Image (spheres, grey):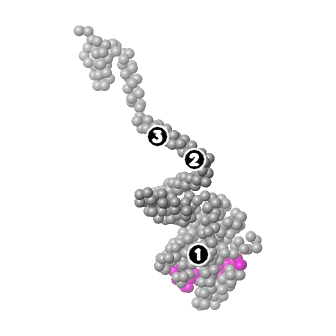
Amino acid sequence: MALSCRGVCRGASVILLYGQRPVGVKASLCTPRLTSTQSSLWFVSHYSPSQARHGIGRNIVSRLKWANEKYERFLQRRFPRFYVLYHTFMKGFRLLFQDAKEIRRIQTRVLTDNIGYENLPYRELEKLRQFRRDLIKAIPLAILSIPPFANYLVFILMYLYPRQLLIRHFWTPQQLVEFQGIYHSQRAQHHWAIVKGLEGTAPSVQDSHLKSRLVELCSKVRNGAHPVVSDVHAVRTLFSGLPLGVRRMYADQMRHLCPLLFLTPRLPAFWVGRRLNKHALELMQLDRAIVRLGLHQLNDAELREACFVRGLNPDHLSPGYCREWLTQWLQFSTHLKESETSLYLHSMVLLTVNFSKHPRH
């Protein structure tokens, strides 16, 4: 019985799949069909489901991006005030996500390279410090949004109280300047109480020379003069032990120092002293990192932020004056020991309160 064409091709398929040729079947009889089958198998072997999924995902992302851009143009045209709020929030989430990735990269490098945090570059140290503070501030809001439908209430609260509830990523540039001014005015309310506390400590100083230098320093600040670094260094021994060490001073004096670092004073005295010491050491490490980097490497925004963190309000100062003050500050702080954190904290008042009132400024 003659072999039909369908049977020959079926036999060729068996050969391709199992590598065996049936008895009586010649390859020359079905060469055209074999060529077509081989092309199909080549396509199957080079077809990747992951590539297909990647193409579909990329298409979906591009469609979502197009829809989002169209929605933003609609908001900008019809609801401009809401668009500013929406754009600020979206930008804030992107910046926060970028910071989280950067923090993870820094911590991974610290663990893998076995280097201490104090040896990190200035910008990485500052990012770690700021991200930790942002995270602490964001935790209560995240907890509040856990119950069902509570996110609507959280959104209203964030709109009504952006300074209290939101971190800097979600502030507009105008809000950033405004809120920094409010924060500085809040800590400025404690400046003269801190100076008065130093004057009240002077009678308990045994060394008459140190007592007179401390009284002279406080009098100079009260009269509106800006002391030089040597005036502060002259009384540095009083701030490493009794009566003005960070854990030896009166509790009221410690509580007045807390707003300088935006810390709550409503804690037990021993805890307040520990937190003040920890944050002062952190800023001293940042000062040494700036020296390693070079002050000239800081841009204007970084320069203003560095001055603000250390107690100076840079709102009405030019970048040149901010650089001048920070140069003096680094000359003072880089010579301090770890036991002199109390002097570091008090100098955030002594070396800042009258700087903008100086005749040169």
Tell me which residue sits at (66%, 60%) in the image: 300
Between residues 16 and 168, which one lies in front from this camera angle?
168
Residue under numbered circle 3: 57
Identify residue type, mark 1.
Leu
From the viewer's perspective, is the residue at label 3 or at label 2 nearer?
2
Which secondary structure type mostly characterizes the magenta part of the structure? loop
Residue marked by disc 1:
345
Mark 1: few/some/many CA within 10 Å (<14, 14-19, 20+): many
Is residue 327 among what the camera can see? Answer: no
Observer-side mark, 1 or 3, equals 3
Quadrant into which the N terminus falls = top left
Q: Amino acid at mark 3?
A: Gly
Image spot of residue 76 (x, y percent): 61, 48
> Earlier along the polypeptide chain: callout 3 or callout 2?
3
Q: Earlier in the sequence, mark 2 or mark 1?
A: 2
Q: Which element type, helix, strand or loop, lies under badge 3?
A: helix
| Residue 53 visible in the picture | yes
Residue closer to the observer: 170 or 192: 170
Residue 184 point in image, percent of width and height: 62, 70
- In the image, residue 334 lies in the stretch drawn in magenta: no
Residue underneath mark 2: 72
The stretch in magenta equals: 224-248
Say which of 322 and 252 sits in front.
252
